[in-house]
Amino acid sequence: MEEYDFLVIGSGSGLDVANAAANQGQSVAIVEKGRLGGTCLNRGCIPSKQLLYHADVLETIERADAFHIDATVEDVDFAEIVREVTADVHGSSDSIERGLVSSDRHDLYQAEGRFVDERTIELVVGDHDGERLTADTVLVAAGTRPAVPPIDGIEAVDSLTSREALQLESTPDHLVIVGGGYIAAELAQFFGTFGSDVSIVGRRPYLLPDADAEVAAEFTERYADRFDVYTGYEATTVVESGGSITVEARPFSESDGDADAETAGPGETVSVTGDELLVATGRVPNTDTLNVEAAGIETDAAGFVETDEYLRATADGVWALGDIVGEYLLKHNANHEARAVTRNLFGEGLEPVDYSAMPFAVFGSPEVAGVGLTEQEVREADREYATHTYRYEETARGSAMKASGFVKPIIDLEGEILGCHIVGPEASDLIQEVVVAMTAGSGTVRDIRESVHIHPALSEVVQRAFSGQFTRGGGHDHGPDH
């Protein structure tokens, strides 16, 4: 039995806490069964956004004729694009591994770990099979994996998850995507831009169902102009025959929840056939591989680790962070939680994690970003509020870009920012000043309205959204460009 002061399971954002522990002079063990760097670096946001930027470049060229520029694309080396991104990602992961292996402050165990007792794990599969490690403090940061829904026939077909899709070296002729969230949206943009026909089957009325409904509706309409989009349908059967994969889907009613076929909504079924199937229906926590019950670590109904407001798990001396906690499955949230755990472990007192201004972004075309409450969440909470919507094309820069989209702030009747939601170019950057206002400013309309914005930069669309006539309970007021 090897004994340590600190042990972390997972090598994503949990490494930040491990490094802090090492800097405190503690003995540190890191258990990782896969590539170093976690999901974001190896199978998530880093490779996907690198690939998507290539799609952005191609899309820009293809839009050139709208600006009276005659430009053509003579060739695309798709395989080389994917290989280059994969090599870059692997290089970063290998660099992390080399640093840990050469460190005299960390012990790296490249194996799968399972709890056998309080703060004690047994290593399996790797070079240290059968060894046991124990620590005074254990951090569970083992992440999530793609969910595979109970679709009839899904186990018998050769389907893709995001992991495999990010390494395809040729574009499908026709990609069928089951799922309507951000992974589906981003991979539809990537493969669709590089020439694949794309069909999307999603259960909810709109794509991006967790976004503000008005934003999700515009995003869905824009995607429906480019792809075959079947929202409000649940995939029920998958069949593979002769190199083609067919998905059968039936109407899905929101009121049915996870209803069975007998309670499905009214309407006709649809059938969609392609040569590749991507399953993008969410993610499940890896707690079922860790035997967390042996350590007294409680999970919720979906399997995510239960923590208090400081990110302490239910077992003494055990903490958790990142996707496996399930608060927000976002890398920047995991980094935020890592900073919180570090403060709480090595600081002078405990401080709750502040999720009040946690932004998100979807790198589709158009981009979508948001922070705070959606309008539907405000309504469900029975709070008084006001909104205002301002469109990109009503600013000088937006007009020059031939951009389409809008910014939608939501405030309370005292002017406090409750949320803001954007659909359109550079949404992931434009949302940031709202995040800063909610985090470091007074958190009111005044922070943005009275800040000087460069004219005619695109950021004016945010300022004007916060400067117009808000409508109580919703509505629109599009002011002129000046």
Image (cartoon, rainbow, N blue to C red):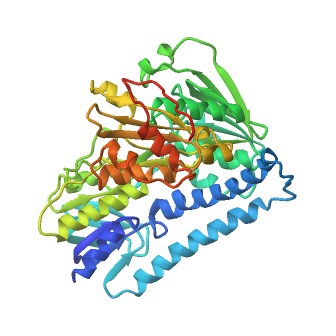
Left-right relation of 179 to 72? left
Residue nearest the viewer, comparing 140 with 57: 57
Residue nearest the viewer, comparing 316 with 118: 316
Picture coordinates of residue 75, whole percent (x, y): 85, 59
- In this rendering, the answer to whether 161 lies above or below 140 is above
Q: Residue at x 79, y 50 (%)?
A: 64
Left-right relation of 294 to 144? left
In the image, farthest residue toward the front: 482
Residue nearest the viewer, comparing 195 with 303: 195
Residue 130 visible to the viewer: no
- In this rendering, the answer to whether 292 lies above or below 174 is below
The N terminus: image quadrant: bottom left
Picture coordinates of residue 150, whole percent (x, y): 50, 33
In the image, farthest residue toward the left: 349
Q: Residue at x 71, y 63 (%)?
A: 81
In the image, farthest residue toward the top: 266
Left-right relation of 402 to 66? left
Picture coordinates of residue 220, whole percent (x, y): 59, 32
The C terminus: image quadrant: top right
Task: Classify residue 38 by image quadrant.
Answer: bottom left
Q: Residue at x 57, y 54 (%)?
A: 163
Residue nearest the viewer, comparing 263 with 93: 93
- Badge count: 0
Picture coordinates of residue 393, whole percent (x, y): 62, 39
- In this rendering, the answer to whether 391 lies above or below 189 is above
Residue 407 visible to the viewer: yes
Task: Classify residue 226 by image quadrant.
Answer: top right
